[in-house]
Amino acid sequence: MRHKDSDPTVEELQLPDVLAALSDPLRLGVVRLLADGGERNFGEFCAPVAKSTLSHHLRTLRAAGIVQSRNEGTRCYLTLRRADLDSRFPQLLDAVLSAADHDEVGNHVGLQTD
Amino acid sequence: MRHKDSDPTVEELQLPDVLAALSDPLRLGVVRLLADGGERNFGEFCAPVAKSTLSHHLRTLRAAGIVQSRNEGTRCYLTLRRADLDSRFPQLLDAVLSAADHDEVGNHVGLQTD
DNA sequence: TTCGATGTTCGGTGACGATCGAACATCAAC
DNA sequence: GTTGATGTTCGATCGTCACCGAACATCGAA
């Protein structure tokens, strides 16, 4: 079996992978910060883990098809693939985000406020 | 830290735990078979894994608060804690079940048909 | 071209999870 | 009681994952 190095297309999105990616509080925190549809710089995210660890979580989110990244110079900009997720798994993201907001899951992830 | 040996109450349900428990195809298959609200005997479930493995998955589902078990003699009867999940995480279970049905996730789990 | 900023990748570690077979516990039935 | 059915627990293995620091690659700016 070959290794997948590109993001999954809409049809390739797999429910178990999406749920697994969303089951980590840190990743859920990142997703919540992207929930307004805006584009965020990777470096804006603050979390109590090493940079390499944060990068690993980003890779996980990309691999599951939850976020998308775009490079501009040395910067990396992220967006939530909400339309793709909604079309493939209607109501799922909304339900997860509502629950996460209510429970404040991933509140230890923030944005640079300087 | 003390070990939790009883099922979580409604208030104790944690979103990451629930999502993690639902991220396994086999467990998702079990949940789908319980989705009609009926009670099913543990032994009814057929899956291509050892009995001990199935038991482990059941424990995981119970620990996450997704199912409930009742003992009668040597038998073990399971039900989905749908009301609890709905009250704590509205729309989540419906969204997951719809997506799982559509994708036929966990179809390798079945019921004894003899 | 040298430097600093930005991310990614690498090697390693420790924890967790899926899996199995075997052993065990419990209960019903004979 | 002995036996059989039903589940659970145990010990072990194997893979995956979160995490870190260090090394690396890339790009913009001085």
Image: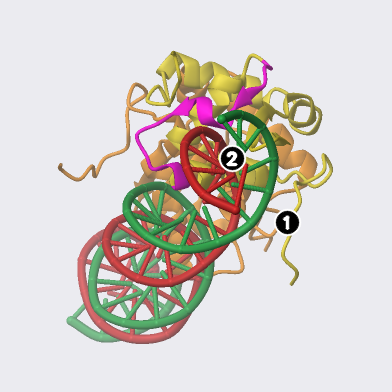
Chain colours: A orange, B yellow, C green, D red
Q: Is residue A40 something one can see in this rendering?
A: no
In this figure, which residue is indicated by the disc labeled 1? Answer: B5
Left or right of C7 on screen, residue B101: right
Q: Looking at numbered disc 1 in the image, what kind of residue is underneath it?
A: Asp
Q: Residue at x 44, y 42 (%)?
A: B51
For marks 1 and 2, the one nearer the N-term is 1
Q: What residue span does the magenta drawing correspond to?
A: B37-52
Image quadrant where one finds the C terminus of chain B: top left
Q: Chain of mark 1?
A: B
In percent of the image, x 50 and y 51: which residue is there? A41
Q: Is residue B83 left or right of residue A43?
A: right
Chain under disc 2: B
Residue A19 location (% of width, % of height): 51, 37
Q: How many discs mark residues in the rendered view?
A: 2
Where is A25 relative to A53, above or below?
A: above
Residue B74 in the image: state x and y as whole percent: 64, 38
Q: Position of residue C9 (x, y in %)?
A: 25, 64
Location of mark 2 (residue): B19
